[in-house]
Image: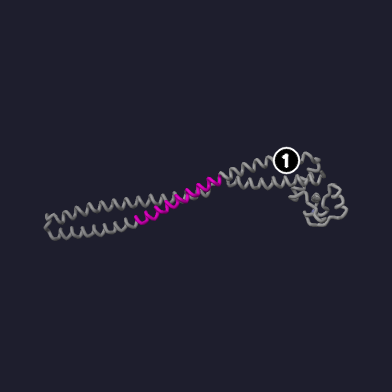
Amino acid sequence: MDIARQLYQLQEVDLEIESDEKTLNGVVVRLGDNRVILEAQGRLASAEQQLDELRRRQRTAEQETEDLVVKLTTVEGQLYSGRIQNPKELAALQHEVELFKVKRSRLDDGVLVIMDEVERVESDVAAATTALQKLEAAWNQEQQALTAEAAKLRSKLTDLKQKRQSLSAGIDTPVVGVYDKLRKQKGQAVARVEQGICRGCRISLPSSDLQQVRSGNLVHCSSCGRIMFLP
Ligand SMILES: [Zn+2]
């Protein structure tokens, strides 16, 4: 086999290795990246915290109402006991009862507002829980797929590197050196010649160079320097 063909095959393996390594890096970055789960957990925790706080406020308000009812019952008991005859004292007690009733009505309104809020935040918590469960299920599935893909790519890369080794072992070391240097400089060291044109830089080859390529000699494009390969 002519040297240009061997180098072209080497380049095809190298380009595949390069592309697979890039894909593998992308897969590795996504493996274990659970930011989306952490964010969903954060949203749930925040809704739960809000709910706890509301329930605490609800209990406090309910306790205040209970205390007030006890006081109101006591004052009403005094008022209607018949033991107090003094009109001034009676009027004062009556006034106290009215004040307690107003206060109680305010407290009841407050409890209702809190209960509405509790209901709203309870549904937030339920929605955040469902969203988190869905995300976790999708994430686990994705991670499994990524793990499998990474394993497949690693195994393929091992094979490709072995193939590269045996290909380059069949080529003179200095020629591989020239190839490697060109690969580093230009990305592609070997360019196909199609219809007398270098596909690396799209410049026509002088007929003498073309003749050399046809004879299986190692020719560099006089314009871009790449190794010419006639398929
Ligand atoms: Zn060229």
Residue 127: x percent and y percent? 44, 52
Residue that mark 1 sits on: 163
Residue 130 colored magenta?
A: yes
Q: Quadrant of the N terminus?
A: top right
Q: Main secondary structure of the magenta part?
A: helix
Instruction: Please name the residue shown 66% across and 46% down the image.
Output: 20
Residue 156: x percent and y percent? 67, 42
Q: Amino acid at mark 1?
A: Lys
Using the image as rendered, state which of residue 76 and residue 190 is in the foreground: 190
- Answer left or right for 133 relative to 187: left
Residue farthest toward the right in the current orientation of the protein: 208
In the image, residue 180 above or below residue 196: above
Residue 13: x percent and y percent? 72, 45
Query: What segment is highlighted magenta in the picture?
Result: 114-143
Instruction: Please name the residue shown 40% across and 52% down the image.
Output: 50
Q: How many marks?
A: 1
Residue neighbourhood size for the residue with mark 1, other residues' Cα within 10 Å, grouped as few (<14), some (14–19), many (≥20): some
Residue 120 colored magenta?
A: yes
Using the image as rendered, state which of residue 97 and residue 228 is in the foreground: 228
- Answer left or right for 65 relative to 9: left
- Answer left or right for 88 relative to 216: left
Instruction: Please name the residue shown 81% across and 46% down the image.
Output: 4
Instruction: Please name the residue shown 35% across and 56% down the image.
Output: 116
- Answer left or right for 214 relative to 161: right
Residue 77: x percent and y percent? 17, 54
In the image, residue 6 above or below residue 106: above
* Picture quadrant of residue 90: bottom left
Using the image as rendered, state which of residue 89 and residue 34 is in the foreground: 34
Q: Secondary structure at mark 1?
A: helix
